[in-house]
Amino acid sequence: MQLDGPVTARQARPAEDARRPNPFIKIVLLGLTVALAIWAAFPLIENEAWIGLAILAATTAGLLHLYLTPRHVPAKYLVPGTILLIAFQVFPVLYTASTAFTNFGDGHRGSKAEAVVAIQTASVTQVPGSTQYALTVATTGDPATGPLVFLITDPATRQVRAGDAAGLRDISATVNSAGRVTAADGYTVLTTGQASLRSKEITALAVPTGGGAIRSSGLSRAYEGKAGRLYDESCDCVRDTTTGRTWTADEGLGSFVAEDGDRLAQGWKVTVGLSNFTRVLTEPAISGPFLRTLVWNLAFALASTGGTFVLGLLCAIALHSPRVRGRILYRVLLILPYAMPSFAMLLVWRDMFNTDFGLINNLFGTDVDWFGGATSARFAVILVQLWLGYPYMFLVATGALQAIPGELSEASRIDGAGAWAAFRKITLPLLMVALTPLLISSFAFNFNNFNAIYLTTEGAPFPADNPANGATDLLITYTYRLAFGGAGAQYGFAAAISIFIFVIVAVVSAISFRRTRRQEEVYS
């Protein structure tokens, strides 16, 4: 016989306890959080990033308080995602935006003081009477990759000093009869073989001194050379000690500039306001290629998205009828391009379009230089993107077609509508309600489809007067070439173009989503 009655607190407790998370797991996760915070604190302290250290400490304390108390249950689920969103989305966007207002790039990476040191040390030469030192190469990390340090022994006092890009400092060490350091606290002395493997780094290292720098002369000797260019604080300028020529500091440009406009290669990072943005619109050498690239970028994104959608939808409709035999086999074959790694397929297609030994020219008996002309190269990359992208549209269109009730098609046939009219008036609008958000995301992806261009044409062909901007370049590949090109990185300018890309994609997406909401209101 079964007895009914109210459930007591003691009876409900086992079920409630079963739903509670294991406290051991919580302790382990919080321990890992604290350990990660401690690990991250050391580089912040070393670089004197006190604001970052305070944020780290406050975040860690907040997490401990949140998960060690039974209150604030919704926050326990929202806070981890919010922290990851800020760390991996908001912060990179803000950092990119702030970089766009600076001249950050090659020659403009550090402070003015660092630029002065770099200019002076780069001009160091050995002169008669230069002090010679016994040199021992060491590191504070791994012998193969750690930062290099010069351990030099003064020939008169046999005092050992350690030197790197930050300067010299006295240390205690054990020295042999030849003046070479055999052991030093906190440093790993490199063997001759280990030092030989890093000879280029050793040659490039200059330890700044008051009037010049210490450079290596082989692996066992060093000399204190004299700087050919010295900074004069009274005039805020750099003066050539041989010719007397001066370069005065220009705080607006972040460079030392001579009277004739010549700039020293080494400068410093400064805020340039809207300069990077106005360059895109006002400098003829930049605005023309930028606008041409923008037009082609829009055409590529629209053709890739529209072409893959139409082809994928046609394949989905063709295989939607139950009367088609072997539908499963056909569907498996159609999604093969989507199942293969895209970067590998792009490289294969690049070789297929090769003029001399490519499959396409050999198959059709042609001799087309596909990547040699602007039109043929653009057609080729769109064709490759069509082949790679239609399986995705085929899959989503197949799922959307299967979700449309069959009664709608039957009702349209009863009303006398033909197949095309039923598709145009019923099936397609319902498909667009479901697929428009996916088309918008596909457009945003193709607008920034770096791999599709860089792994096939690398932006080629390039005009003779502008090797930095090719006919098939998208804005993203153009930005990459500016940021990491051989002519010198321009991170600030590249960040400004990234802002333009963000605004364009955001505007197009916002307009498209507004139209999607209107469709949902009509067909809901």
Image (cartoon, rainbow, N blue to C red):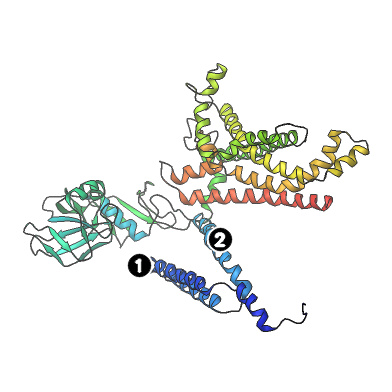
Say which of 437 and 414 sits in front: 414
Q: Is residue 507 above or below residue 452?
A: below
Q: Quadrant of residue 382?
A: top right
Q: Where is residue 428? Give x, y as percent.
A: 79, 41
Q: Is residue 123 visible?
A: no
Would you call the spot at circle 2 few (<14 residues within 10 Å), some (14-19), or many (20 or more)? few
Label 1 element class: helix
The residue lying toward the viewer, choosing from 295 and 9, is 9
Marking on residue 90: 2
* Farthest front residue in view: 1
- Which residue is painted at 84% across and 33% down in the image? 420
Q: Residue at x 15, y 50 (%)?
A: 127
Considering every residue shown, the one lying at the far right of the view is: 415
The residue identified by callout 1 is: 46
Disc 2, SS: helix
Give the spatial CA distance, label 1 vs label 2.
25 Å
Most distant residue in the top direction: 365
Residue 66, disc:
none
Query: In the rendered image, which quarter contains the N terminus?
Result: bottom right
